[in-house]
Image (cartoon, rainbow, N blue to C red):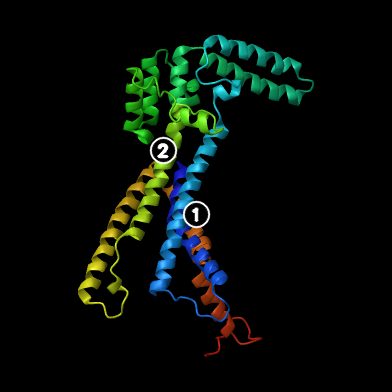
Amino acid sequence: MSSHILSYIGWTFLPNLVTGWVQSLYYGLTIRAGDPKPQPGTPRYIKHRQRIHVAVIVIYLIYTIYEGDYLVRQEGDFYQDLDLPVDVDERKIKARFRRLAAIYHPDKAVNPEEHANAEIYFVKLKSAQDTLTDATKRFAYERFGPDILTWQHVSSIRDYILVGLQSIAPLYGGSIVVMIVLSLFGYLQWGRYVLNPFFTTFTSHPPILPFQFLALAHKATFTFFIALGQLSPLFAPQDRTAINSSSSSAVDEQHLQRLEQLAQSSEIETQRLLALEMAPLVGDEAGQNDMKGRVREWLVQNTIRADPEVRDAMGRAMAKRRVGAPAGARPVAI
C-alpha cells in the first residue's frame, strides 16, 4: 500500500519537475549564448513544454511498467526455483527435487553459515515440490501466489478460492473473479498462462503465472490511469486566440470554465485515490500526522526549492546583496 502512495506522489510532482529541467537543458544546448530564449507564456515556449511533458510522461509510464515487471521476476516462483516449465507433470517435479536435494542438502554444508543458508534453500525447494505436486495447492498457488502457504483451514479448491477472493478483492475486484470462473469452466485452458506464448517465442522473458500477471496488471493499470489523466489535458484542443493578447473575453471565459472543470475532476479523483491509499491509516491520527509531515517536507525539499524559477529568484536576490554586508542586511535597490 505504501508503494502506491509513493507512486502517486511521484506521478503528481515528478513529471512537472523533470519537464522544467529538461526544457532548461534543451534551451541551454540548442540556443547559443547571447540569443534570447523563449519566455514563459509565449506560443513557442508552450509548444516546447507540451512536447517535452508528453515525452516525460510516456517515458515514466514505460519505466514504471518495466519496474513492476522486474520486481515480479525478481521475486520468482516455484517453477523457477526448480528450473522447470510451467506445464511440467508431477513425475518430473519429484525427479527434479530429488536431484536438487542431493546437491543442496544441509548435511553437505561444511560450516554453520553454509548450513543455515542451505537449510533455508532446502526448505524453499521442499515447499515448491510439496505445492506443485498437490493438484489443489498448485491450482491455488498459480492464481493467488505463495500467500496460500500461510492460509489455514483450507483443503479444497473451493476453500482456496473463497479465501483468495477475500484477500485480494479490495485490489483486483472483478478481474480475478472473471479469471477464476473462466478457468473453472475450462475457457482459459489454451491461454492458461497469459502472454507466455509471446514471451517464450520472441523474448527471453520467463513465463508468468496468473497471480504474477495480476500483480503486473495492477501496477500498470494504476500508473496508466494517472499517466492518462496527465496526458489528456496536453492533447485537449487549444484555441490559438487564447494566447493572443487581443483574444475576446468570451473565449477567455470558456477556457477558464474548462480549466475549472478539469481542476474539479482532478480534485475529486485525487481525493478518491488518496482515500483509497490512506484507508489503512483511518483512525490512526498519529500515523496520519506523520504521513502529512513527511509529504510536506518532501514537497519543500524536492518541489519548491528544486524548481528552476525559485532557484533563479534566490540567485538574483543574493546578487543584489551588498558585498561584505552582514547577515540580515537589506539588498541594494537596483
Q: Quadrant of the N terminus?
A: top left
- Packing grade of label 2 (10 A; few <14, some 14-19, many >=20) is some
Give residue 229's mark.
Answer: none
Left of 124 or right of it: where is 23? left
Viewer-proximal residue, 152 or 225?
225
Above or below 154: residue 247: below
1 or 2: mark nearer the eye: 2
Give percent across and percent down for residue 130: 54, 14
Give percent across and percent down for residue 261: 25, 60
Viewer-proximal residue, 201 or 185?
201
Query: Circle 2 sits in a helix, a strand or a loop, which is it?
Result: helix
Give percent across and percent down for residue 139: 44, 18
Looking at numbered disc 1 in the image, what kind of residue is underneath it? Answer: Arg
Snapshot quadrant of residue 85: top right
Q: Residue furthest top?
A: 91
Left of 237 or right of it: where is 116? right
- Asked if labels 2 and 1 touch by Cβ distance under 8 angstroms, the answer is no
Query: Circle 1 sits in a helix, a strand or a loop, which is it?
Result: helix
Mark count = 2
Give percent across and percent down for residue 54: 42, 57
The residue beneath circle 1 is 294
Residue in the image at 66% along x and 13% along y: 99
Looking at numbered disc 2 in the image, what kind of residue is underneath it? Answer: His
Residue in the image at 54% along x and 33% along y: 205
Viewer-proximal residue, 201 or 27?
201
Above or below 3: residue 107: above
How many angstroms separate mark 1 from mark 2 (CA)?
Answer: 26 Å
Viewer-proximal residue, 291 or 61?
61
Give residue 218's mark.
Answer: 2
Of labels 1 and 2, earlier in sequence is 2
